[in-house]
Every structure is written in C-alpha cells, then in structure tokens.
Image: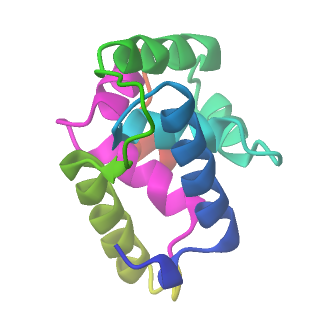
Amino acid sequence: MRLDRLTMKAQEALQAAQALAQQKGHQRLESEHLLLALLEQEDRMVGQVLQKVGTPLPRLRAGLEESLMRVPSVSGGSALHLSDRLNRLFLAADEEAKRLTDAYTLTEHLLLASFSDDELPSSTSAWACGARAWRLR
C-alpha cells in the first residue's frame, strides 16, 4: 500500500478506520473498520452511492459492527497492524485505480475493492445487504 497514492479523502478514511480500531481495542486494522469509516465520512458520498444501488445502510452498518465484535480486543495500547485482508483490499483498490487510469486511489476505488473480494468480511456484509461491485461500476 502506498499512502502517497491515496487521495486526501482516502487518507482521512484510513485515519478514521485506525481511530475506530483503537477505540475498540483491536490490534489489527480490518476491512470492516475502513468501510465503516467510509460510510461515516463528512460528505457521505460512499453512503449515497450505496443507497443509490439499493443497499440498506443500517443493515450494512449492523453487519459490519457484528463482524467487528468477533475481532479480538486487547487493552494496554499495543501497536495497530494492517491485516492481510485489508492489505489485499488496498492492493485491489490500487489496481482498480490503474485500470481506470487514475493517478490516485480514490474512496470509490476502496469501495469497489471492499466489495470485490469474497474473503473480506466487508464484502460478506455487503453481499448480505444486496450490494454488488458490478452495480457500482
């Protein structure tokens, strides 16, 4: 993952995801943290896109929160690590940006990548709510 290729909005989402993980006492930063952070961004663009394709946001949030409840938590201020799954998401988002000939990785690329990998809990939660990557393209 190259932070210098993330737009400001994507960097803000990553920072918000880190804060959420720390708030919950998680050692690993997961795709669910990132998707929840994207949904809560000030401009609400990701939520608006998902609503446009018929995704029930409260149900999606609940699924993501439920998934995060299964992530082990620790106390004592340990370091936060990027999970392998989230690293794959960032790599997929970077590939999506390249495919679209974008110089930077946008929040939209992160959203597409989070729904494209069947092994990501964020994708599983999204599928359960009817969200599909092909609807977003």
Q: 79 above or below 40? A: below
Is residue 7 rendered to the left or right of residue 2?
right
Residue 56 x, y percent position in the rendering: 59, 16
User: Would you identify the image quadrant in which residue 8 lies?
Assistant: bottom right
Q: Quadrant of the N terminus?
A: bottom left
User: Would you identify the image quadrant in which residue 115 lies?
Assistant: top left
Q: 64 above or below 17? A: above
Residue 132 x, y percent position in the rendering: 39, 35
Q: Residue at x 66, y 59 (%)?
A: 12
- Front-lying residue, 82 or 11: 82
Q: Residue at x 45, y 27 (%)?
A: 25
Residue 99 x, y percent position in the rendering: 35, 78
Q: Is residue 137 visible?
A: no
Characterize the magenta stretch by its predominant secondary structure: helix
Is residue 125 rendered to the left or right of residue 46?
left
For the record, the magenta segment spans: 105-128
Question: Going by the picture, which residue comes out furthest to the right?
Answer: 43
Q: Residue at x 45, y 21 (%)?
A: 64
